[in-house]
Amino acid sequence: NAGVMQNPRHLVRRRGQEARLRCSPMKGHSHVYWYRQLPEEGLKFMVYLQKENIIDESGMPKERFSAEFPKEGPSILRIQQVVRGDSAAYFCASSREFKSDTQYFGPGTRLTVL
Amino acid sequence: GNSVTQMEGPVTLSEEAFLTINCTYTATGYPSLFWYVQYPGEGLQLLLKATKADDKGSNKGFEATYRKETTSFHLEKGSVQVSDSAVYFCALPNSGGGADGLTFGKGTHLIIQP
């Protein structure tokens, strides 16, 4: 049973470009979470999604960031017009379809903004 | 919302020493509590969890007991190995529990010397 998949593992963008990060949850999981880890800091919750629905986006910056989890395909975290402060590791996690509080994490995407 | 405080590192120990990493929490109700471990350059792995008061989670020689009277979930291991060197995160759900984003402590960097 494959774990949570994220791609790309490393992404380099210049200021002003767009970054798209993808996450495929574990088989049988329909809850997806995105977290950001800034250098030398812990993980900060960004957004929680179920298929075609955003459940909680209280941790998302108000501008430039968006997330989706379509009926088919992976979840996407999009960052428009990236700035140097967006450089971080972005982790995706998933949990089972019915009520469960155990989350399983992907390997992360390390975004570097030049 | 819920919050968690854990001791900050780095914590440096010799191989076979006894390990304690302190974690205390503030929460509404009695949510599940988690310890995650992050090895260099990797994502987070669930180490152990406890779902109710007095529960003891255990895995790979690590243990933590859910203490509601002291609101603590300290991580312990009787004899550490060099391979235990990693960053350890205490976590709990953001709020009510169930399928919800997680709130993490800042992480404790553990260094085990041979």
Image: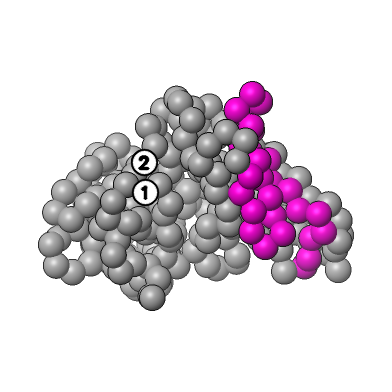
Question: Of B46 and A68, which appears nearest the observer?
Answer: B46
User: Which image quarter is the C terminus of chain A in?
Assistant: bottom left
Whole-percent x and y of residue A6? Answer: 35, 69
CB atoms of marks 1 and 2 within 8 Å: yes
Residue A63, given in percent of the width and then of the height, sits at 23, 43
Residue corresponding to mark 2 = B98
Marks 1 and 2 share the same chain: no
Residue at the disc numbered 1: A100
Question: Which picture quadrant has residue B28?
Answer: top left
Q: Is residue A9 above or below residue A113?
A: below
Report the magenta residues as a range.
B56-82
The chain holding disc 1 is: A
Residue at x 28% of width, y 65% of height = A28
Q: Please state the chain letter of the residue tagged with numbered disc 2 in the rendered image.
A: B
* CA distance for labels 1 and 2: 5 Å
Considering depth in this image, is A39 or A22 the residue closer to the camera?
Answer: A22
Residue type, numbered disc 1: Ser
Residue extending farthest bottom: A1
Sort mark 2 into few (<14), some (14-19) or many (20+) by Cα contacts within 10 Å.
Answer: some
Verify whether residue A46 appears in magenta.
Answer: no
Q: Residue A81 lies in what quarter of the image? A: bottom left
Q: Amino acid at mark 2?
A: Gly
Image height of A1 relative to A105, above or below:
below
